[in-house]
Image (cartoon, helix red, strand yellow):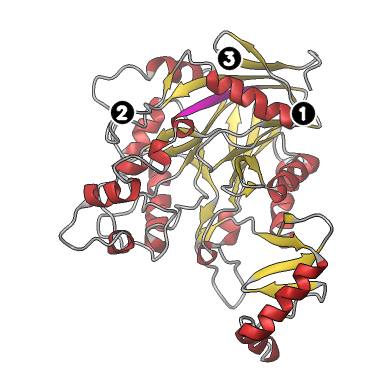
Amino acid sequence: MTIAATGDSFITRRFPAGDEAHCELAQWIGGFDIRFTNLEVTLPRRESFPGAQSGGTWGAADPSVLDDLRKYGFNALAWANNHTLDYSYEGLEETERQLDRYDWVHAGAGQNLAEAGAIRYMEFSSGRAALIAATSTFHESWRAGEQRGDMVGRPGVNPLRYATTYRISEQQLVQLKVIAADTGINDYQEMLVKEGFVSREADDGITFGGHRFVASEAAGAKTQPHPGDIARILGAIGNARRQADYVIVSIHSHEIKDGRKEAPADFLREFARRCIDEGAHAVIGHGPHIIRGVELYRGRPILYSLGNFIFQNDSVDRLPSDFYEKYGLGPEHRTADALDARSAGDSRGLGASPDVWSSVVAGLAFEGGDVAEMRFRPISLGYGEPRYRRGWPRLTNDGSVLLKLQSLSRELGTEFVIEGTQAIWKRGNGNG
């Protein structure tokens, strides 16, 4: 079994007519069995209303962009991410309808929790593959709900929640309790506990303003995956590994560690490893819009983030009033005004970061259930070009992104060799 994997496809424009620059990339991707990307836009009807929350940009595109994704050779996608409900439940339902209409294998969202967490199968001459998708980055109201005998489920994403505990000194914890008593910051929470609407936290620290603090000799933040969510996803993996030759898990996660965007959070590493323990053959990550390192765990790859494949978040043609109000703009302003305000004329934010526009595509080959070879090829998305032109991927000879991948993977115990324009790992070469 072979897999071509990419990161986020935030596609909002049609493919340029007559542009053949994608052919080399499509030819490479097309040589693999599973050809995966993460769809990070919704496909709502024009009259669909925007949600009160978004993933940062209300990401909407015409369903015809699915044809353009096909031009790159993709045959499977995830759509559980922080944009899935940018256009509320109606947008989710229409996106699902269009994905089915265009005959995509897709996973990660649906009309209830069972559908959002459903295993999607693919048939190849080399074997049967299963795809499961989830996200840890989402608004709480976007979490899909379970069906009951007396209640329908709620549309949404397949969630991986996590808990964050902030570790401070004993002295700081005492001070925090004094501040809480003096300011009354926890009074409403205490009332909810007394009235039975929420449960009281364990008495080993304090919840201050919605955040949990405990005393510890080592300061910092620690994150842990939600027990119920991880049990549900592991259950799906356990089922899939008995029904397919290979199991692929997709996870969308923006969360960081120690202030480093390129470092996966603790809960994400725990989740990914437990997926492998349960029988997953590969975990494919995306979300932060930059690359992260690769970990080889028990002979199987964890790709913590493949960065962007297509990134056109500054090419949306309409935005709700909420976006304009955030930047002090009114009804007389237009989309370009709002995007200029957010980016300060393209001098800040994602558009101004070179790392956002330089990424990799991965090619994985498996033998006997474990990965035998990994190859990563660099792509450029047009850093420095006008926002209405950048965002399409092109294979490049620039090896700087490979050096970054090599360095970040080394931190996770995996050693890549750079040969020409590829970063390569092969089983048996003693490289982790």
Residue type marked 3 = Gln
Which one is closest to the eye, mark 3 or mark 1?
Answer: 1
Q: Which quarter of the figure is the C terminus placed in?
A: top right
> Can you give x and y, in whole percent of width and height, for residue 221 in the image?
71, 56
Which one is closest to the eye, mark 2 or mark 3?
Answer: 2
Q: Is residue 58 left or right of residue 277?
A: left
Residue type marked 1 = Gly
Nearest to N terminus: mark 3 or mark 1: 1
Please say if the residues under marks 2 and 3 sit with CB atoms less than 8 Å apart. no
> In the structure shown, which secondary structural element does the residue marked by tag 2 occupy?
loop
> Can you give x and y, in whole percent of width and height, for residue 184 in the image?
62, 85
Q: Relative to 269, say whether 162 is above or below.
A: below
User: Which residue lies most toward the top here?
Assistant: 420
> Can you give x and y, in whole percent of width and height, for residue 79 in the image?
49, 47
Q: Which mark is residue 422?
A: 3
Which corner quadrant of the image does residue 159 belong to?
Answer: bottom right
> In the structure shown, which secondary structural element does the residue marked by tag 1 occupy?
loop
Residue 230: tell me if it is visible. Answer: yes
Q: Which residues are magenta?
A: 358-364
Give the residue number, with chain letter if any, for mark 2. Answer: 385
Task: Say whether residue 398 is magenta.
Answer: no
Give the residue number, with chain letter if any, for mark 1. Answer: 413
